[in-house]
C-alpha cells in the first residue's frame, strides 16, 4: 500500500507542478511563508496519517518532543473550546517550515492554488486575503477575481481554477486507480484525541 500511495503522490505532484507553473504569475509562495499551515483544520485520512507518522519518526528526538508537546497543548485547548470549529496552527510547522515536508498530506500539497469545484464555484486561496496569491487581481468589492485587473496588469495567463477539493483528490476513482485506500478522514488534531470524529 505504501509504495502505491507514493506513486499516487508522485502523480499528484506532477499535476500540481503543471498547475503551479501555469499560474506562476499569481503565486507568491516563498520559503518562510507559512500562513497556509496556520489557523485551519487540515483534513487527513488514515493512509496519509500512516505516511506522516513515518516522517515524524524520522525526525530527531528533540523535534519529536516539541511536536508532541504542541499536540498535548492543542488537545487541552480543544477540550476547553466552546465554538463550532477548532482551528489551530499545524504542530509540524517549525521555524515557518514544514518539518515533515516529504511526508505531508494531500491537502498540504494544494495550498496556494485557485480551486474550482465541479459546479463551477471558484475558491480563492486564503492567503489571497493577506495580500499573497492572486491578491493583485482580486476585487474586494465584488469578492471575485477581476478580468479588468488581469488585463490592466498585463498578465499573460488567465487565473485558472483546478478541481483540488480534498474530497475529489481522495475519491474512490483514485483509490481504484492506484490500489490504495484512504480510509477514515478527519482533522489532523482529531487523530490524536481519543473518541473524536
Ligand atoms: S503538515 Fe506540513 S505542510 Fe501540512 S499543514 Fe503541517 S506544516 Fe503545513
Ligand atoms: S500558499 Fe500562500 S501562505 Fe502558503 S506559502 Fe504560498 S503564498 Fe504563503
Image (cartoon, rainbow, N blue to C red):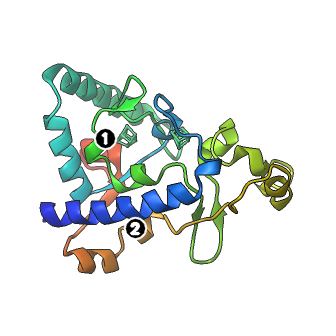
- Residue 169 lies, in percent from the top left, at 40, 67
Residue located beneath label 1 in the image: 101
Task: Judge by depth and name the residue closer to the eye, 48 or 76.
Answer: 48
Residue located beneath label 2 in the image: 169
Residue 107 shown left or right of residue 175 in the figure:
right
Above-or-below relation of 137 to 75: below
- Residue 59 got which mark? none
Q: Is residue 45 visible?
A: yes
Cα separation, mark 1 vs mark 2, equals 19 Å
Residue 172 shown left or right of residue 2 in the figure:
right
Above-or-below relation of 16 to 24: below
Report the quarter where the N terminus lies. bottom left
Residue 65 shown left or right of residue 97 in the figure:
left
Q: Is residue 193 visible?
A: no
The residue carrying mark 1 has its beta carbon less than 8 Å from ligand 1: yes
Query: Which of the four quarters of the rendered structure image does ligand 1 lie in?
Result: top left
Report the quarter where the C terminus lies. bottom left
User: Residue at left 64%, top 49%?
Assistant: 25
Report which quarter residue 106 is drawn in: bottom left
Find numbered disc 2 in the image and state the secondary structure of the residue it sits on. helix
User: Residue at left 30%, top 33%?
Assistant: 99
User: Residue at left 14%, top 23%?
Assistant: 61
Task: Judge by depth and name the residue closer to the eye, 55 or 10.
Answer: 10
Amino acid at each position: 500500500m505504501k509504495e502505491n500511495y507514493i506513486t499516487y503522490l508522485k502523480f499528484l505532484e506532477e499535476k500540481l507542478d503543471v498547475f503551479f507553473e501555469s499560474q506562476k504569475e499569481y503565486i507568491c509562495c516563498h520559503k518562510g511563508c507559512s500562513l497556509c499551515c496556520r489557523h485551519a483544520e487540515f483534513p487527513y485520512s488514515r493512509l496519509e496519517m500512516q505516511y506522516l507518522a513515518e516522517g515524524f519518526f524520522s525526525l530527531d528526538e528533540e523535534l519529536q518532543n516539541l511536536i508532541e508537546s504542541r499536540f498535548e497543548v492543542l488537545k487541552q485547548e480543544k477540550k476547553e473550546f466552546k465554538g463550532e470549529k477548532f482551528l489551530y496552527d499545524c504542530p509540524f510547522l517549525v521555524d515557518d517550515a514544514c518539518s515533515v515536508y516529504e511526508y505531508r498530506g494531500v491537502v498540504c500539497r494544494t495550498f496556494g492554488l485557485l480551486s474550482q469545484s465541479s459546479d463551477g464555484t471558484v475558491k480563492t486561496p486564503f492567503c489571497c486575503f493577506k495580500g499573497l496569491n492572486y491578491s493583485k487581481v482580486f476585487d474586494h468589492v465584488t469578492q471575485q477575481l477581476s478580468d479588468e485587473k488581469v488585463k490592466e496588469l498585463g498578465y499573460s495567463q488567465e487565473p485558472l481554477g483546478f478541481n483540488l477539493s480534498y474530497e475529489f483528490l481522495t475519491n474512490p476513482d483514485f483509490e481504484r486507480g492506484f490500489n490504495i485506500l484512504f480510509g477514515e478522514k478527519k482533522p489532523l488534531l482529531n487523530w490524536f484525541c481519543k473518541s473524536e470524529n
